């Protein structure tokens, strides 16, 4: 198992962990993470954030995944009517028991068969 060691780094481990966590958790760019750390008074270049992500990213992501609860087998299908550019569209969403969206289908017509195909694709993944 890889062990995290922040020796020979200018910043403390908590700053490095926070930067890498922000980058991977919210799909931010390196420059966005640089800006967020700058708002907190930490002067780090985006290149440093990139190097941290490459060096520590897999280890931190593995630790985060291990700590997450296992997904339940329960989920449901939502149907929502939305208006986009004046057209009424039907949105089908497969949502798990924790509220995470598993898949989305947008259709111009209400097509139950296509929604059940979405349902089957979600079942195949789980």
Image (cartoon, rainbow, N blue to C red):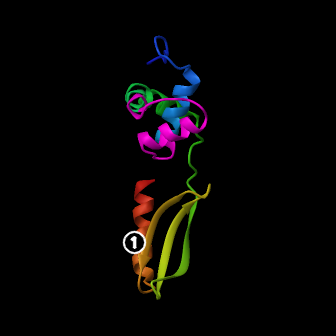
Residue at x-position 53% and y-position 20%? 11
Left/right placement of residue 77 relative to residue 113 reads right
Q: Of 89 and 102, which appears nearest the observer?
A: 89
Against 67, residue 115 (above or below) is below
Q: In the rendered structure, does residue 98 fall within the stretch colored magenta? A: no
Q: Of 20 and 108, which appears nearest the observer?
A: 20
Q: Tag 1: Cα neighbours inside 10 Å, few (<14), some, or many (≥20)?
A: few
Over which residues does the magenta segment extend? 25-49
Q: Where's residue 18, x and y in %?
A: 55, 32
Q: Where's residue 54, x and y in %?
A: 37, 29
Q: Of 88 and 42, which appears nearest the observer?
A: 42
Against 41, residue 96 (above or below) is below
Against 29, residue 125 (above or below) is below
Q: Where's residue 49, x and y in %?
A: 43, 31
Looking at the magenta stretch, what is its main secondary structure? helix
- Residue, disc 1: 117
Residue at x-position 49% and y-position 76%? 91
Q: Quadrant of the N terminus?
A: top left
Q: Where's residue 118, x and y in %?
A: 42, 69
Residue at x-position 45% and y-position 47%? 27
Q: In the rendered structure, does residue 31 fall within the stretch colored magenta? A: yes
Q: How many marks?
A: 1
Q: Secondary structure at mark 1?
A: helix
Residue at x-position 42% and y-position 27%? 52
Q: Of 107 and 123, which appears nearest the observer?
A: 107
């Amino acid at each position: 198992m890889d062990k995290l060691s922040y020796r020979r780094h200018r910043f403390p481990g908590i700053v490095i962990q926070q930067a890498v966590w922000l980058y991977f958790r919210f799909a931010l760019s390196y420059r966005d993470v640089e800006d967020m750390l700058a708002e907190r008074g930490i002067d780090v270049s985006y290149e440093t954030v990139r190097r941290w992500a490459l060096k520590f990213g897999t280890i931190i992501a593995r630790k985060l995944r291990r700590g997450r609860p296992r997904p339940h087998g329960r989920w449901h299908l939502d149907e929502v009517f939305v208006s986009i550019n004046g057209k009424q569209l039907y949105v089908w969403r497969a949502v798990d028991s924790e509220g995470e969206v598993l898949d989305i289908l947008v259709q111009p017509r209400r097509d139950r068969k296509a929604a059940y195909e979405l349902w089957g694709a979600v079942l195949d993944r789980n």
